[in-house]
Image (cartoon, rainbow, N blue to C red):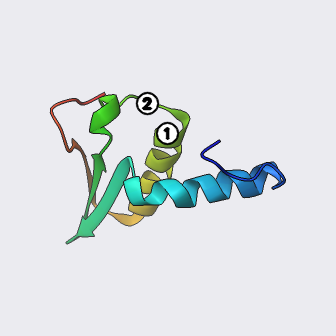
Amino acid sequence: MLGLRTSLAPAARRAAARRLLASEAAVLYAEAKNVATITLNAAASRNALSLSVIEQLDEAFVRADGAGCVLLLSSSKQFC
């Protein structure tokens, strides 16, 4: 699993994997003037929904809870 040591507990492995993938986030989040923008950013996989993407989308929508409007966009031509 992404070259992580297998001696780590499963939760620690998942957290480490998230940190490794953070530089290549599949979901981007921005907020300005009460408008949250969530962008699918996994063009290589054509923005396919995976467990990681679903978790990142969930986190983004939780962050957007107080926004007046949420825009869901894609950084490429593909939009799941």
Q: Are marks 2 and 1 in contact (CB under 8 Å)?
A: yes
| Residue occupying the point 29% across, 29% down | 46
Of mark 2 and mark 1, the one earlier in the sequence is: 2
Q: Is residue 18 left or right of residue 71?
A: right
Visible residue check, residue 65 = no
Q: Position of residue 25 (x, y in %)?
A: 39, 53
Considering depth in this image, is 67 or 51 the residue closer to the camera? Answer: 51
Name the amino acid, label 1. Answer: Ile
Quarter-of-image position of residue 51: top right
Query: How many marks on residues?
Result: 2
The C terminus, quarter of image = top left
Instruction: Give the numbered dot on residue 49.
Output: 2
User: SS for tag 2?
Assistant: loop
Q: Amino acid under label 2?
A: Leu
- Residue under circle 1? 54
75 relative to 4 in the view: left or right: left
Above/below status of 51 relative to 70: above
Q: Nearer the viewer, residue 12 or 38?
A: 12
